[in-house]
């Protein structure tokens, strides 16, 4: 396999897998959140929870902050608070509310507590799966590139195994106008079906290979129709 094409297959295959997996997890996370919020609104229990300051936050009279809260139910509490507000409140607003906030809560199938403040749940707009769709599009495009490199390699193998044989003569080597300067195109001439032609290879040869091709000067070429490849290791 051509080194450049092999590297392209590996790189784009990794991109395909990574973006597909990321897209799946984004989609699953979004769907889970949407379903959880809908269920919390329909089946959750609405209670008034006691608010208090979260550690690590300096509450001033000017700022607006998230607040921790404790549910008025008997449960084993691993942490100081059962949840924290999504909406922010100033100290004055919290005092005006009596340091209490209305929240929904429920327990999932594994017994884990799920709780959010009522205002957030009531105003929640289901998240769209556009992020996962974009990632899947990127994954599909990357996979198309993988198929492109695989297809080129397979076609080259077919030509090298079943093509007509001729002798090629080195003309020149040069970089492509676009892309990395690591790889060169090689222009060479050979007799195809009784007619001498000059063709240019894809930019697939590195500097060492080009030097060897120049040193050999002539080499075996195989062709099918107008497609040809240098059939010699350098």
Image: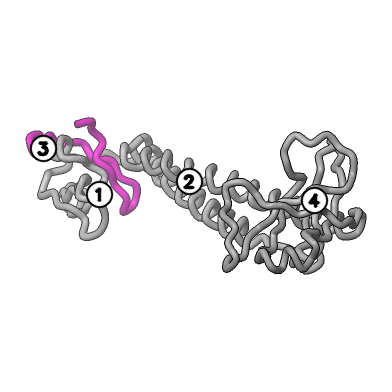
Q: Nearer the viewer, mark 2 or mark 3?
A: 2
Q: Nearer the viewer, residue 51 or 19?
A: 51
Work out whether residue 85 or residue 190 is closer to the camera in this orientation and state it. Answer: 85
Query: Residue at position x 57%, y 47% from top?
Result: 56
Q: Position of residue 136 (x, y in %)?
A: 59, 54
| Residue 48 on the magenta span | no
Q: CA distance from mark 2 to mark 4?
A: 37 Å
- Counting from the top left corner in percent of width and height, residue 192 is at 23, 49
The residues colored magenta run 212-234
Report how far apart the C-alphas of labels 1 and 3 lie in the structure.
15 Å
Q: Which residue sits at x=61%, y=50%?
A: 23
Q: Which residue is mark 4?
A: 115
Instruction: Tell me the quarter of the image containing the N terminus.
Output: top left
Mark 1, residue position = 203
Residue on which disc 3 sits: 211
Of circles 1 and 2, the one toward us is: 2
Q: Is residue 225 magenta-colored?
A: yes
How far apart are the two marked residues, 2 and 3, measured between alpha carbons? Answer: 33 Å
Assign a secondary structure to mark 2.
helix
Residue denoted by label 2: 15
> What is the spatial separation of the Cα atoms under label 1 and label 4, in whole angstroms?
59 Å
């Amino acid at each position: 396999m051509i080194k450049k094409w092999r590297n392209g297959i590996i790189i784009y295959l990794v991109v395909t897998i990574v973006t597909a997996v990321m897209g799946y997890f984004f989609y699953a996370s979004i769907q889970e959140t949407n379903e959880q919020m809908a269920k919390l609104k329909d089946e959750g229990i609405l209670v008034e929870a006691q608010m208090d300051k979260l550690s690590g936050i300096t509450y001033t009279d000017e700022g607006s902050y998230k607040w921790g809260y404790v549910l008025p139910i008997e449960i084993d509490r691993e942490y100081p608070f059962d949840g924290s507000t999504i909406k922010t409140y100033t100290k004055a607003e919290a005092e005006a509310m009596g340091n209490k906030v209305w929240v929904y809560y429920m327990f999932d199938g594994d017994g884990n507590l799920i709780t959010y403040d009522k205002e957030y749940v009531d105003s929640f707009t289901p998240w769209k799966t556009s992020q996962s769709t974009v990632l899947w599009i990127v994954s599909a495009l990357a996979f198309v590139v993988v198929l492109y490199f695989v297809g080129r390699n397979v076609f080259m193998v077919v030509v090298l195994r079943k093509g007509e044989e001729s002798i090629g003569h080195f003309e020149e080597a040069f970089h492509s106008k676009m892309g990395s300067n690591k790889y060169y195109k090689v222009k060479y001439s050979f007799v195809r079906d009784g007619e001498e032609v000059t063709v240019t290879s894809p930019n697939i040869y590195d500097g060492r290979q080009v030097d060897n091709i120049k040193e050999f000067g002539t080499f075996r070429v195989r062709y099918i129709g107008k497609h040809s490849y240098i059939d010699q290791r350098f």
